[in-house]
Structure formats: C-alpha cells, structure tokens
Amino acid sequence: MIPVSAPPRVRDRLLAAPQGPVRVVHRGRHAVYLDVGGWCVGVVDQHAVQVPCALTTRLDDLSELGGGPAYLFAGVLHLSGVPLAIGRLRRVVVPALRQAIPAQHTDPVAPLGIENVARLVGAGDGLTPRGDDVLCGWLAMHRAAGVATPVVDEAVRVRLQETTLLSATLLDCALHGEVLPQFAAYVGALGTPARTDVERELLAVGHSTGSGLLEGARWATGELWASVGEPA
C-alpha cells in the first residue's frame, strides 16, 4: 500500500466510479495519468507537477509501480496491484484576491470572448496545449476575484472534447477554481513584494504550462482592472 493525498473532487470521483480496469492515458517516471469515467486522474511523485486532478505520493519516482495494469476497487485506485490509499485531502482551490489589483501589475485589455475560446482550446502540443493553459489561468483568476464568467464557461465546456483528456480535465478544474500550487502562490502574492519570486516559480512549471497560465492570469487581471477603473 502507498499513502497518497487527494483533492476532494478526485476522491469523490474515485468513490463514484465503477469498479474494474482503468485505462492508462500516459505513463512516465514521475507521473501516470488514467481515464476514470472520462476524467483524467493523475498519480504523481514529489518531483512532478502537482496538478489539481492528481493523487500525490511522497515517492521519488513511480518506477516501483512498474508497468502493470490499473484498476479501481471500492473507490481505491490500484497500480500494478498496489493500492493507493488516500490518507489526507489536499486543498487546491485558488485563494481569493485580498485587494484590488494595482495598476502597475497589469494593463487593460480586450475581454476574452467565445471566439478566443474557439481559437485557444486544444491549440498547441503535448498533454496540455498552451492555449488551454492560457484559458486555465484566465478562468482561475476570475474565480479568485469572485467574478462569474458564464458565457466563457459554457464556450469552454462545449469544446472539451477538442483537446487532450488531461487538458480537458484541467480546464474543468479551472472552472471550479482548482489550480496548481504555484498558481495559488502567485495569486496570493499579487500586490506584495513576493510577487516577482513566485511569478518566476510559476514560469518554471513545465515546458510552457507556467507561461501559459501567467498569460491567462494577466489577460484576466487586465479585464478586471478595466472593470474597476481605479484602485481601491
């Protein structure tokens, strides 16, 4: 048995999913991604990107789990016959913005609309195309600000089949305000001296994931700044 931590929605999905074999979408040294009822659930070690749809282990790598099959039994995911027991829940929700975004941190921009969503969903290479990362950053920043975006939300939902399973799941996470820890740290540091350091840490995530998330966050903050006009 290997103890893992899980976001609440991941735990709930595993409990609700039918027992039986689970398809492996991607298997690497530091991360394994699986299709659980059309939603991507990851298993990651401590060196992997801590995506908000993953079970997190304290392993240095996942080689001991081998290349065997995956299956669910009584809400517990098994890899190569090893049960991954959820020992604690992990908070992955973006923090609320504590103050209005200072003008020096962003410039007003044109609002993101459904035509932008159509252009961005699935645009790029890899398991998480950059266009999706931009949308994730935009959505999550609006969640942090407590600003509803129903038109964009619906435009994203109807196009989830146009990208990879992992990326579609991360878009769903962003719609629920669930983010990477580096993004949460970035939002929490806005308007503080720590912003530069945490922004650098966000940019270091993945090949282009961090820069895409930051681009989306800046797009969103530009819109939000334009909507308030003057700092509080």
Image: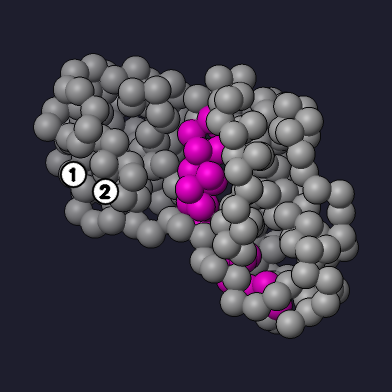
Q: Is residue 3 magenta?
A: no
Residue 149 position, x and y percent, is 63, 48
Mark 2: secondary structure = strand
Look at the image and tell me in which quarter the C terminus lies: bottom right
Please, what is the dominant secondary structure of the magenta stretch? helix
Q: How packed is label 1: few (under 14 Cα within 10 Å), some, or many (20 or more)?
A: some
Residue at which label 1 appears: 85
Q: Point out which mark residue 4 bears.
A: 2
Q: Give the quadrant of residue 221.
A: bottom right
Residue drawn at (72%, 49%) of the image: 216
Foreground residue among 25 and 140: 140
Look at the image and tell me in which quarter the N terminus lies: top left
Q: Which amino acid does the dot numbered 1 rest on?
A: Ala
Residue drawn at (19%, 18%) of the image: 20
Magenta range is 167-191
Q: Is residue 196 above or below residue 42?
A: below
Q: How packed is label 2: few (under 14 Cα within 10 Å), some, or many (20 or more)?
A: many
User: Do residues under tags 1 and 2 come within 8 Å of each other at their CB atoms?
Assistant: yes
Foreground residue among 41 and 31: 41
